[in-house]
């Protein structure tokens, strides 16, 4: 929400502005696997509290800097600290509540808080941007400190710790691979084909090195066998597409509402309010729906709503109707998140041993952030190389989100075809349900 104000004050290009978002996304997504595994090994409470302190400090730094490079650096540090808080928090939930209705309800409440913060944060940032964009970076400081204070007193100290070690080299190679991948996509319109091919090949080479390392190190960052479970793989692909398409849509929509239509940050924030309210109000009910219908069906319905929400904005023009275009589009996106986000979280940790809950949580969050970085980079390339017609360029960016959402629908539907042909045991029943 604050991006146009940041761009105006710090004199950043659109391509550089994208790194204010991607800097956080890459720090977050690049180290989530290490953060999840660290929570399993050192204790989830300890990791959560230490990372919250770093998060507060990085937020303060982001609100005080006076140039784009320092802002991107602060965002990256903030993302790194978030990479340790997110899987630690989620794995505290999944190891506290037994698998089944109790965990599903707990996860629906947890993800309602996460999705509400994500959605309503857009609205709050609109108000704060009216005061000054720096307040959007400073406001998380007291929130993080309050969470740190309450967590130190309310979270039990008896952390279960898994056996094993660390894979720092694996974390470095996968982070470097993602950095190069997004850099390649963002820079492609402005550099030669040869350079694009070289950086793209380097990214793939680092990814191959990561996979090679994971098969050979004693304590891999990610046990690759965990993805052999179809429901886990589908959940990670699903969250990748959900977040990737939506973050890219948000970035394009901010440019459309504020730069093309001349809306204020507050008016733009209020446009996103219907989606945020729907998520906040309905997400807590998804646990009971998942018990009744299974997460697979909820994800499929949510993805259909996601496609419909994006498709509404393909009709965007210079004078869009709020009630005829913006409002119904945002309502559909709110329904999509309310159904899909909690269901994907439930599906991603089903049948996973407690010793690997941090890993499963980190893997899920990593998938979402990687999707966000890659799809955002693609959309940024579309926006910076548009035809000269800003409305047509915006529609082209929305088409990218629609295409990814259609792929997500195919993945979701494929999961509905799998059914057990024998009497399943307890874990197999969980797999069938999701």
Image (spheres, rainbow, N blue to C red):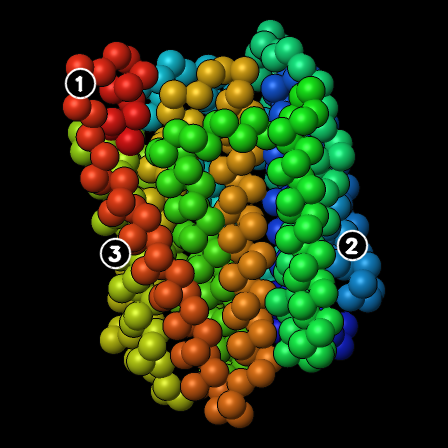
Q: Which residue is mark 1?
A: 422
State left or right for residue 332 relative to residue 258. Answer: left
Q: Position of residue 349 (x, y in %)?
A: 42, 27
Q: Disc 3 on helix, strand or loop?
A: helix
Q: Quadrant of the N terminus?
A: bottom right
Q: Disc 2 on helix, strand or loop?
A: helix
Q: Of tags 2 and 1, which is closer to the observer? A: 1
Q: Position of residue 136 (x, y in %)?
A: 64, 56
Name which residue lies at 39% across and 72% down.
Answer: 399
Q: Earlier in the sequence, mark 2 or mark 3?
A: 2
Q: Of tags 2 and 3, which is closer to the observer? A: 3
Q: Which residue is mark 3?
A: 304
Q: Position of residue 115 (x, y in %)?
A: 44, 45
Q: Residues within 10 Å of mark 2 (few under 14, many from 20)?
A: many
Question: Residue 83, relative to residue 432: is it above or below?
Answer: below
Q: Earlier in the sequence, mark 2 or mark 1?
A: 2
Question: Residue 307, relative to residue 161: is it above or below?
Answer: below
Give the image quarter of residue 404. bottom left
Question: Residue 206, relative to residue 258: is it above or below?
Answer: above
Give the image quarter of residue 159. top right
């Amino acid at each position: 929400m604050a991006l146009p104000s940041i761009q105006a004050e710090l004199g950043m290009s659109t391509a550089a502005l994208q790194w204010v978002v991607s800097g956080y996304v890459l720090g977050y997504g690049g180290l989530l696997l290490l953060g999840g595994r660290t929570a399993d090994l050192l204790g989830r409470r300890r990791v959560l509290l230490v990372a919250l302190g770093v998060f507060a400090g990085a937020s303060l730094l982001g609100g005080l800097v006076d140039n784009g490079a320092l802002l991107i650096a602060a965002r990256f540090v903030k993302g790194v600290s978030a990479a340790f808080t997110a899987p630690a928090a989620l794995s505290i939930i999944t190891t506290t509540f037994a698998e089944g209705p109790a965990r599903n309800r707990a996860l629906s409440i947890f993800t309602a808080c996460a999705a509400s913060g994500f959605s309503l944060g857009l609205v709050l940032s609109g108000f704060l941007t009216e005061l000054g964009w720096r307040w959007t970076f400073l406001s998380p400081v007291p929130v993080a400190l309050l969470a740190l204070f309450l967590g130190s007193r309310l979270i039990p100290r008896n952390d279960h710790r898994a056996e094993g070690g660390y894979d720092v080299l694996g974390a470095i190679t996968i982070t470097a691979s993602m950095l190069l991948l997004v850099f390649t996509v963002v820079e492609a319109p402005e550099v030669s084909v040869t350079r694009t091919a070289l950086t793209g090949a380097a990214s793939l080479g680092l990814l191959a090195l990561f996979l090679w390392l994971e098969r050979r190190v004693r304590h891999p960052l990610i046990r690759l066998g965990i993805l052999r479970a179809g429901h886990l793989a589908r959940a990670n692909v699903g969250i990748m597409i959900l977040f990737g398409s939506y973050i890219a849509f948000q970035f394009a929509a901010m440019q459309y509402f504020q730069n093309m239509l001349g809306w204020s940050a507050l008016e733009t924030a209020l446009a996103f309010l219907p989606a945020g309210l729907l998520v906040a109000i309905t997400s807590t009910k998804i646990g009971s729906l998942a018990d009744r219908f299974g997460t697979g069906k909820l994800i499929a319905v949510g993805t259909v709503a996601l496609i419909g929400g994006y498709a509404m904005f393909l009709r965007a023009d210079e004078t869009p109707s709020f009630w005829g275009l913006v409002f119904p589009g945002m309502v559909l996106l709110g329904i999509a998140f309310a159904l899909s986000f909690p269901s994907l979280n439930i599906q991603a940790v089903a049948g996973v041993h407690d010793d690997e809950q941090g890993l499963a949580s980190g893997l899920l969050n990593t998938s979402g952030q990687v999707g966000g970085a890659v799809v955002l980079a693609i959309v940024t390339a579309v926006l910076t190389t548009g035809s000269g017609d800003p409305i047509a360029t915006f529609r082209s960016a929305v088409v990218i989100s629609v295409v990814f959402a259609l792929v997500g629908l195919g993945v979701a539907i494929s999961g509905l075809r799998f059914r057990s042909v024998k009497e399943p045991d307890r874990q197999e029943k969980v797999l069938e349900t999701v």
